[in-house]
Image (cartoon, grey):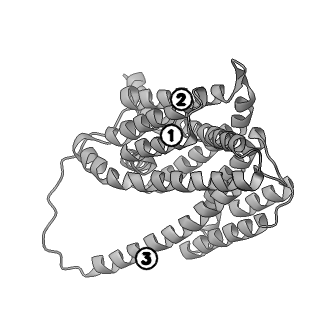
Amino acid sequence: MVLGVDMNSLLSYVEPVVVVTNVANSLFDTALLMEVYDQLNGTAAGKSDVVQKEVARFYMIYNMIYSLAPLLTTVLLGKWADRQGQKVLLVVPLLGYLLGRLLLLFTHIFQLPVNVMFGSAVINGLTGGFPAYWSGINAITALRSEPAKRSLRLNVLEVASGMAGFIGSLASGHFFLMKVNNQQGILLICLCLILYLLSLLYSAFILRYPSVQPQRQLPTEVNDPSPKRYSTQIILLFICYLLYDFGVTGGENIITIFVLKPPLSWGAVWVGYGNAAGYVMFLTSFLGVLILSKWLSDTSLVLMGIISNTAGFTTMAFVRRSSVYFIGKYCTSL
């Protein structure tokens, strides 16, 4: 009986899904970048400026589709999950990950144009993508944890996600160089898809989900004027997050493309190492909040994060050697 209770408790943790999925994400990021760069480098006859422009154009369109498409379905999936349970928010996005990123394998094997990968972004978006998946992960974790330990559990989840991405990125370049049928990249893409499949199967058939709670009717009359004040604060926080995310995402995309051309001219292994350096931020952020929150306010911690990112991107503007690049990455992780 005790063993059964313990087993049910273990099977209620979402950490295995987070770890396996984020390792797969990190493998896919390296595989996609190398596939896009290799194809466009061949069509542009090795002209680095032309290749960089075309890769930047591809990622601009890809990221726009990947970011905007989930807006159409995340709300619908959320309402569906309220009635049917949180399983919807994991299984549907993970199925989208698997099907969408299967296109990368077809693109590689059949030498399809890289624009086919826009279809991958559409599939990921229409199945909820990362917003639906991560909201489901957070919802399950919050429902499974005590109120006093909820914040710690969510932070540990972020660290687990970051460390999984770190390990996957370190290994991704080495897997890319391993040849199957005298072709590079196939093994990396297949490993990525296998991990997505394992995560999907675990979420669909093994993971224990919280029971669906009946929805209660909220009172129609509320005399407390504070919700208006809180809604204003939420709107301002949302705007700040968007501005920050636009800056960070845009900067990361430029840097990702920059490392492939001279003076760095990185290959797949170093691209993986560079991606891994970005995941260190998950651990340093957790430790920083855990330690510094005793003496600093939330606003001060947010400002420290913004300043460290600004310092890191400023350092990368002057990168001519790999060592300087990693110094800049270290600054963004502080």
Q: Residue at x 61, y 60 (%)?
A: 290
User: For numbered disc 3, what is the local secondary structure?
Assistant: helix
Question: Residue 204's spot in the image, x, y percent?
Answer: 37, 29
**Image quarter (top left, top right, bottom left or bottom right) of the C terminus:** bottom right
Q: Amino acid at mark 3?
A: Leu
Residue occupying the point 87% across, 56% down = 321
Q: Looking at the image, do the residues carrying marks 3 and 1 touch, with CB atoms under 8 Å apart?
A: no
Alpha-carbon span between mark 1 and mark 2: 9 Å
Q: Which residue is mark 2?
A: 106
Which residue: 50% across, 33% down? 103
Q: Are marks 2 and 3 in contact (CB under 8 Å)?
A: no
Q: Secondary structure at mark 1?
A: helix
Image side of residue 155 versus residue 326, left or right = left
> Is residue 149 visible in the rendered structure shown here?
no
Amino acid type shown at disc 1: Val
On the image, which quarter does residue 238 sit in?
Answer: bottom left
Check disc 2: other Cα within 10 Å, few if <14, some if 14-19, many if 20+: few
Q: Is 156 placed left or right of 330 in the picture?
A: left
Task: Please indicate, yes or no, whether residue 222 appears anywhere in the rendered image.
Answer: yes
Is residue 171 placed above or below 256 in the rendered structure?
above
Amino acid bearing label 2: Phe
Residue under pointer 1:
116
Q: Which numbered disc flags the more N-terminal residue, 1 or 2? A: 2
- Which circle's residue, 3 or 1, is located before the other in the chain? 1
Quadrant housing the N terminus: top left
Residue 55 position within the rendered picture, expressed as x and y whole percent measured from the top left:
64, 51
Alpha carbon distance from label 2 to label 3: 43 Å
Residue holding disc 3:
236
Locate residue 306: give its quadrant.
bottom right
Whether label 1 touches label 2, CB < 8 Å = yes
Front position among marks 3 and 1:
1
